[in-house]
Amino acid sequence: MRERHARFKGTARLSITSLRFSENGVRAINQRNIDRLVNIYRVRGCLRREREHRIPALIESSALATALEVSGAVPDTLLGSEDDPPLLVFPEASVECLHGQHRILAASRYLEDNNRWWVVDLYDQGRSLVIALRQYFRDGYADYEQTSDGEIFRKLRLYSRSGQVELERNMWCQLSPSKQRDLKQLLANEPLRTAFDNLLDWPGLWPSMKLGTFHRLLTMRYVWRRICVDRPDIMASTDSKTVDLVQLRAPCASKVDRNHIELGMDSMLLYPAVINIQDRYSIREGICQMRQIPSLFTFFEDLIYLECCSKALRSLFDSSQGTIHESMSQLYTRHSATDCLLPIQLQDGTFRECAGNDIDGQEFGYQQLWLYVMRHFPEMVPATPRKENGIPKPKVKEPDSRTWYGFAALAQHLGFASEQIAALLITDP
C-alpha cells in the first residue's frame, strides 16, 4: 500500500513496557502459544533484530519528536540503522502496536529487567489511520504462530461484513484450494453462515475450528450468551484458555465441575480480563447454571466420532444419495394402520415392548441402531476412541464378525431389511 510507505518513519528499539495492544484486535490471546514462545526463546533467543520479527506500531509525530530529542537522535537515524536501531524512550503503554502481542508477552517473561526491549517499525498515525491500513498491518506482518483455520474464517467474515474487500481477499489467500472449496460451500448455505456469524463475538472459540468439517453446525450461541450475561464486552473477553478450562464441564449437574469453575473464577484463571467483582460473580453464576458447556472444539470432536458411526450405518444400504435417516426410512418394513408393540432394546439381547405406530417404530429403530454403533464402532470400522490420559493409545482392530452379525440381527429385529442386512445374517459366526 502506498499509504503504508508514506507513513513509515523508521525502526527503533523500544522498551516493552512502552508498548500496548489495541483491545479491538481480531486475535485471541493463546496462553499455550506464549508458553511455546518462551521455550523457543530459551533455546534460540528472541532474535529481536531480525526483520521478520519486528512489530508495527503507530506513533504521533509530536511524541516521536519528543522521544528523539530525549534520546539525542535525529529522524535519519531511524531509517539508516536497521542493523543497530537506536533506543527511544516513550511513556509506559503509549505506543500502539498492531501485531506481535504473543511475542511481547513471552518476552516479558523471558528477558531480564534491564534488557526488555523490542525492535519496532514506527508509522505516523497522523490525524487518522484508515481501518483497512490498520488491518493490513495486523494481518500482513509475520507471526510466530500459524493462524488457525478458525481465526482465518473469523477475520474473513468480519472483513466481509464490513465491506473490506482487499483484506477479505488476503484471508482467502491463506487457505489451501481444498479449504477454499469447503468454505465456499459453507458460505453458500445461509443458515450455516448465519449460525457461524452469530459466534463471531467470542474470539476464544475460534482457534479449535477445523475447516475440513464445515458440513454441519450445532449452535452454542445461547449457552455462551448466558455465560457472558449478554454483554459484548464480556463476550470479547472470552479467551481460549477460559474456553479450554470450561468446555464439556457440567457445573449444574456435577459438584466437582462446579468447584472447578468456582476455583477458576476465584483465582482469575477464568476470564482474567474481567476484573469487576460484580461482573465476575455474574459470569460464575451463568457458568454454574449450564448442564454442559459446548465449544467449537467439542463440536468438531463430536463430528469425528459421529463420522465413524455413520460409516457403520451406511453399510446397511447401497445408496450414497440423501441422508442416513432418509435411506433407513426406505428400509423399514413394518407398516400398520393401527398401533402395535414395538421392541425397545434394554441391553444387548434383551428387549421390552411398548405401544406405538409404524412412525414410532421406524424412528425408535433408527435411534437404537445409532446407539449400537456408538457402543461398538471400534469393532466395526478402522477407528479408535480418543486416547485417555495415562493410558496407552488404543490400536485399530480388525472388524469383528460377531459385532457385525449382532448389528444386522438387531436391524432385522427392529423391522429393517436390505440385501446388505441379509448378507451379514448369512455370516452367523
Image: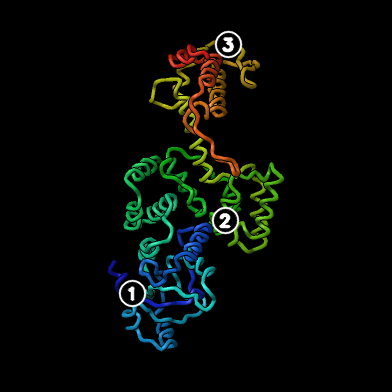
**What percent of the width, then of the height, locates residue 100?**
44, 65
Which residue, given by chain and number where applicable, does mark 3 sit on? 338
Q: Amino acid at mark 3?
A: Thr
Q: Which residue is mark 1?
A: 8
The quadrant holding residue 349 is top right
- Label 3 residue SS: loop
Does residue 309 sit above or below 243 in this rendering?
above
Which residue is at a point 34% across and 58% down the rendered structure image?
Answer: 167
Horizontal side of 360 relative to 63 (left or right) equals right
Q: Is residue 47 above or below residue 89?
A: above
The residue tagged with tag 2: helix, strand or loop?
loop
Outermost left residue: 2
- How far is the residue under mark 1 from the one under mark 2? 38 Å
- Residue 126 drawn above or below residue 131: below
Q: CA distance from mark 2 to mark 3?
A: 53 Å
Mark 2 highlights which residue? 231
Task: Name the secondary structure under disc 1.
Answer: strand
Question: Where residue 130 sits in the image (x, y, percent)?
Answer: 36, 67
* First in sequence: mark 2 vs mark 3: 2
